[in-house]
Amino acid sequence: MNGLGNEILVVDLRQSGQVLTAAQVQSIARLPRLQFDQLMALHPARTPGTAAYVRIYNNDGSESGACGNGMRCIAWAEREASGKAAMVFETARGLLTADASDKASISVDMGTPRFGWADIPLAEPFNDTRHIELQIGPIDKPILHSPSAVNVGNPHAIFWVDDVTAYDLGRLGPMLEYHPIFPDRANISLAQVTSRSSLILRTWERGAGLTRACGSAACAAAVSAARIKLTDRVVRVSVPGGDLTISWTDQDRIVMTGPAEDEFAGEIDLAMLPANSV
């Protein structure tokens, strides 16, 4: 499946009881037809009333705490399988509700943002994470500087720029993802505010690289923009793959709305994949 071009592989393991290893995820990602940005593995529900427990993997085999585009995809897949439009999934971050009444406008509650430096996490204390001390390039004329930091399931750093196309994010992204200030690495975004209700976003995604869409980054940029009074609390976030609507509610919940698309379905023989890294 895909969400705005963000390639998502949904693997239903609810009947097998298996858990994917990092090596298996890496092997799947190398198969030409199955190349993905994120893999959403569905496991038997742990909490009554939920559709599944979901593990989220990046294509490098690392686990992710959130994937908004992937959540919309599994919500639609579950809608097609069960006929139910409203559902609840459980991830490592907690319970997430979804409404898949309309394939073109699927809403997912992405939870609450975390702004504390230790919750993001950052390697050193910052009293105010609306702008942290981080720059790349010459000290007197940095290329990028003073990003907002937030955790929306994953660590995010958002650099505010006048033109998101004016920077080589494919070169800068890896340098910033692994910066020592981010002990768990980070998703790196460039955000351009175009009005009180809209912004443009490009993202280098931790563990996946440049992506056409990153749902959690869209959420991170939206709440960060509202937090520093650049936008209102409901915004349209335009990414290379299309548009998402992000609402930061008065109850401190982030609701993301956007489409999902089917591509193809099949079976994977996990016994044919290596269980451990060589």
Image: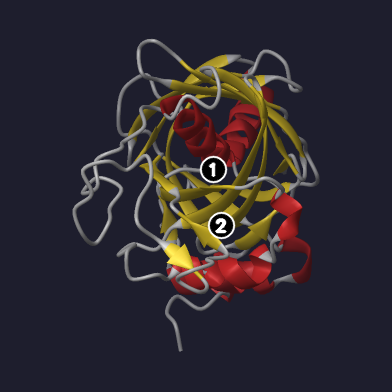
Residue 21 percent across, percent down from the top left? 43, 67
The residue to which callout 1 is attached is 217
Q: Which residue is drawn at 33% across and 71% down?
A: 180
Numbered label attached to residue 24: none
Residue density around tag 1, few if under 14, some if 14–19, many if 20 or more, within 10 Å: many
Q: Is residue 165 left or right of residue 131?
A: right
Q: Is residue 125 left or right of residue 175?
A: left
Q: Is residue 83 above or below residue 119?
A: above
Q: In this view, does 141 lie above or below 226?
A: below
Q: Residue at x 35, y 12 (%)?
A: 251
User: Label 1's element?
Assistant: helix
User: Label 2's element?
Assistant: strand
The foreground one among 223 and 41 is: 223
> Do the numbered discs 1 and 2 sit on residues whose CB atoms are within 8 Å?
yes
Q: Who comes first in sequence, dot 1 or dot 2? A: 2
Q: In this view, does 94 lie above or below 37?
A: above
Visible residue check, residue 190: yes
The residue to which callout 2 is attached is 205
The foreground one among 35 and 140 is: 140
Residue 83 percent across, percent down from the top left? 64, 16
Which three-letter amino acid code belongs to the residue tagged 2?
A: Glu
The foreground one among 91 and 68 is: 68
Residue 195 falls in which quadrant of the image?
Answer: top right
Residue 151 percent across, percent down from the top left? 37, 43
Q: Is residue 234 left or right of residue 226?
A: right
Residue 214 falls in which quadrant of the image?
Answer: top right
Which three-letter amino acid code belongs to the residue tagged 1?
A: Ala
Residue 28 falls in which quadrant of the image?
Answer: bottom right
Residue density around tag 2, few if under 14, some if 14–19, many if 20 or more, within 10 Å: many
The foreground one among 221 and 45 is: 221
